[in-house]
Image (tube, rainbow, N blue to C red):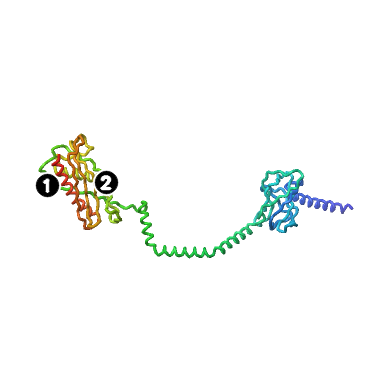
Amino acid sequence: METRAPYVLIGSFVLAAIIAVFGFVYWLNNTGGIGPRSNYHVQFQGPVPGLLVGAGVLFNGIRVGEVTQLGLAPDNPRFVNATISVAAATPVRTDTKVGLDFQGLTGVPVVTLEGGLIVAKSGEPLTLIAEAGAGQSMTQAARDALRRVDTVLEDNSGPLKDTIANLKTFSDGLARNTGKLDGILAGLEKMTGGGTPVQKVAYDLRTPQNLGPAGKTLAASLAIPEPTAVAMLQTQRMLFAPSGDNPGFAEFLWADSIPKLVQARLIDSFENYDIAHAPLRTSDLGQADYQLLIDIRRFRIATDGETRVEIGLSARIVDKTGKVVASRLVETSEKLDKVEPATAVAAFDAAFARIAKELIGWTVQAV
């Protein structure tokens, strides 16, 4: 008996250790103890692939129990009934959401519980209804989605074929008109100020030199204010009548706006005629005895019929009291052989020389 006693003690110790390990595992599997538990019935309205008895139950992501029973619903073979056992302190409500989640790389299924506010009546058996499709895995969901896409494509195969044909026709049209599209894009880029900025070329109006001898000079002081003109003439661009696309003048600019340019060159013309009695600007100090008021009517290139340069002015001489002493219209034109900036400016120089000479002679006689 004495020789056999150590073996009995050793065997008892090993058996106790095994029981302790199994107890510890059981304790971990039941969320830290074998305290009070509550059972709930759960009904899944569809398949629950991979769900087994003993699978975990999570409430808001925390393990609170396990599945204790699984079976098919006797009244509807599509439904699955399950019984879950969770810690009694778990706040399960009648409106708690039930689902099935797949965890880890192997996709082990667990029952998930979430939220809920409505407390069940005392003594009333609580049955939780899982959401439709709760047991559907990601693979199944992808298959169903692809199946629906395939159905849509099959139902609309005719319109899709027509759409693809139209896209091919459109792309062929784009390929045939690549050059035109490049031109359109270049025009848009220029219009919006993109790309390399275009260098503008400024052209001045030449002051006439040979105005004849100053047989008669101005007997009183004269001022020439800035001429008036409609808004269209308040520009540095070359004007055309009728208006149209004139690409040769895209970079053309007068040295100043047309009214200011006419004012400056008229004063220069009077100075060339008689520098001793040259007219003033209204901004100069003092008040002149008379003012030569100019209204610009035309300052353009006319392309209807014979191409020509046209200048038309309305002139009035008024005294200090505002009384009109004299008035007249001064108009002229110059034939234009070639519509290009340099030729057009030369024609304007010739026409303006005649206008300036006529205005000087008339003003000297009137003042």
Which residue shows up at 22% across the image and 40% down it? Answer: 225
The three-letter code of the residue at mark 2 reads Ser
Which residue is the site of mark 1? 212
Q: Secondary structure at mark 1?
A: loop
Q: Position of residue 45 (x, y in %)?
A: 69, 55
Amino acid residing under circle 1: Gly
Q: Position of residue 241 (x, y in %)?
A: 27, 53
Judge from the rendering whether residue 114 lies leftward or rightward of residue 236; answer left or right.
Answer: right
The reply to whether residue 28 is in sight is no
In contact (CB < 8 Å): disc 1 and disc 2: no
Could you tell me residue 63's position as x and y percent?
A: 70, 48
Mark 1, other Cα within 10 Å: few <14 / some 14–19 / many ≥20: few
Q: Position of residue 268 (x, y in %)?
A: 18, 44
Q: Is residue 232 visible?
A: yes
User: In terms of sequence position, does the residue under pointer 1 or pointer 2 come before the other?
Assistant: 1
User: Along the line of sight, which residue is nearer the eye, 218 or 158?
Assistant: 158
